[in-house]
Structure formats: C-alpha cells, structure tokens
Amino acid sequence: MRSGAVIDHLVPERYQPEWLPGSVARHAADLDMLPVGSPGKVGILHLAFERVGGRTELTGHYQKTPLQIARPLYYDPERPDMPYLMFMSAGGGVLQGDRYRIDVSCGEGSSVHLTTQAATRIYRMEQDYATQLVNLTAGPGGYLEYLPDTTIPFAGSRYYQRLRVTVAPDATVVLGETLMAGRLARGERHAYTAYCSDVEVRDSSARLLFADPLRLVPGERPVTGPAVMAGFGLLASLYVVTAAQPAQVVADTMHAVLTGTGLRAGASVLPGDRGAWARILGDRSPEVEAALQLTWNAVRELLLGVPAPDRRKQ
C-alpha cells in the first residue's frame, strides 16, 4: 500500500467476520489440514483508486495469495478513463477454512469497474466453513461497478459472504450477484449445506440505506419457495444506488428490458428512493447472464449515456 495508515491485514480481526449466521457458525471446527490463518488460507485484496490526470488510476495495492488482481485495463472506447479490474484466485476455488477479504475505495470523481476472472466455485467441506468479506467505498461523484461472475456452491459446502458498501450522496454504485443452485449439469441442485449472504449499503455517515439478506439452508427450511429461488436453477440480482436519475425512472428502465427477456424477473425502487434493483430467475446460465448484461447496458445508457462494453475475460 503506497499511502495512508499502515494496516496489519493479517490479524484475525481483519479477515474473520465479527458475526456469522448460526447456520454457518455451527460448523466451526479445527481442520486436519492447514488451519485457518495459514499461508494460502487467507486471501486479501486492499485497493485504492483516485482520479489522476483525467482518468482513474490504481494508487494503492496490497494483495495476499490466493487473491490477486490482473493489471487494470482501459479498453472501453466510450469510457477511456475507466479501468476494468479483474479479481483472481490462485486456488481455483474456495475451500474449507478459507477466509477472504476485499477492500476497495474509490476517491472523488473516480470511475471503476470490478469483476472476477471466472465463476466462484465453493467446494465440498467436511470441516469448518469459508467466508468472504467485501467492502466497497464510492467517494463524492464516484461511479463504481461490481459485477462478479456466478457463484456455484458445491454439494456439502458451507459459506458466508458479506458485501458492505458505503456510497457518497452524489456517487453511483452498481452491484451484481448471480447464484447457481449447484453444479446443475452434474445433477446437484441445492445440495450445499448452507449458503448465506448479506448485502448492506450505507451512506457516508454510516446510516443504513438498505440491506438484503439471503439464507439458503436446505436442511432447515425450503429454498425453492416463491421468496427465494422457486424451482429455478439461477438467481441474479442487480442493485443500482444512485441519485443521478429518479429511482422510479431507473426501475422502469430495468423493468422494460427484463420484460422482453421472457424470464421470471422484476424491478422496483430501493428504500428511500436511493435507486432501484432487479431480480432475475432462470434455468440456464446463458439466458440469465444475457438478461443481466442487457439490464446493465440499459442502466449504463441511462446514467452515463454510453453502452456497456463486452466484458473481456481472456
């Protein structure tokens, strides 16, 4: 890290969640393999972006394997000032006892797109559980997109993810999440032990704007009801936190696009009219990913006046 206070990233208080859902916490156990905190079991990314000389630059960077980043790319001709940054994992997936933490701060007037190299695979766990903490901050006038690829919990996995976002009053944050019910091609559908996540978005004074908890624990309660994944294999969400356009206009824009996809989907305003969100259900990855891409593109056109680029993964 090139600037700011010195941070000890490897103290357990940094990478261990201060709270866990009981459905995940009950599986806490010592590992016969490398214990929690061992090299390769704690992945850290701490990144800072600032507006420098007419474009956004990566000005702070700390990483610890298995988490790492590729070099920021400026390949969008419509937004040559915006870097596209890819998170990567050297481990190829999330294992029992893994603890990941990602912190990204975007300074005043900066614009950043964050994604992942590929789908996040959460492997079978016989001992303990795995967690990921993601903390994103968008400063005044900032524009931040976080659109990771699909998360796939394998049979027997236990996982908790917390996404915390802090957004300035005039900043925009676009968040995407896609969850697959398991390795569907192998006949695994909701065979994981516990998949739990929390999305929390706050303003600059730490006041909670909205939260979206998800608790999928097949052994405790149905996960195929109308309020969760119904009978579908994929669930995608897109949150657009912004004051750049009225919340109802953003919701109507997303709804109009989703109506034409033929999928089970809908859009609505966020609490306090701080933007809008959409949820998409489908059975095949290509159709769900295409619907999410179309919705993101419509949001881009509305808020930035430019289309969304093709997200290169190679």
Image (cartoon, grey):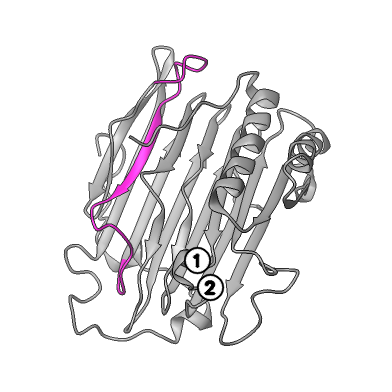
For the stretch drawn in magenta, what is the main secondary structure?
A: loop
Expressed as whole percent of the image width and height from the top left, the position of residue 171 reads 61, 32
Expressed as whole percent of the image width and height from the top left, the position of residue 176 reads 57, 47
Viewer-side residue, 18 vs 196: 196
Residue type, label 1: Leu
Q: Quadrant of residue 49?
A: top left
Disc 2 target residue: 189
Res 236 seen here = yes
Q: Is residue 141 magenta?
A: no
Q: Are marks 2 and 1 in contact (CB under 8 Å)?
A: yes
- Residue 218 in the image: above or below residue 74: below
Q: Which residues are magenta?
A: 75-98
Q: Quadrant of residue 13?
A: bottom left
- Residue 152 in the image: above or below residue 76: below
Label 2: which secondary element: loop
Viewer-side residue, 177 vs 163: 177
Residue 184 - label: 1
Which of the two labelled residues, at mark 2 and mark 1, occupies the earlier sequence position?
A: 1
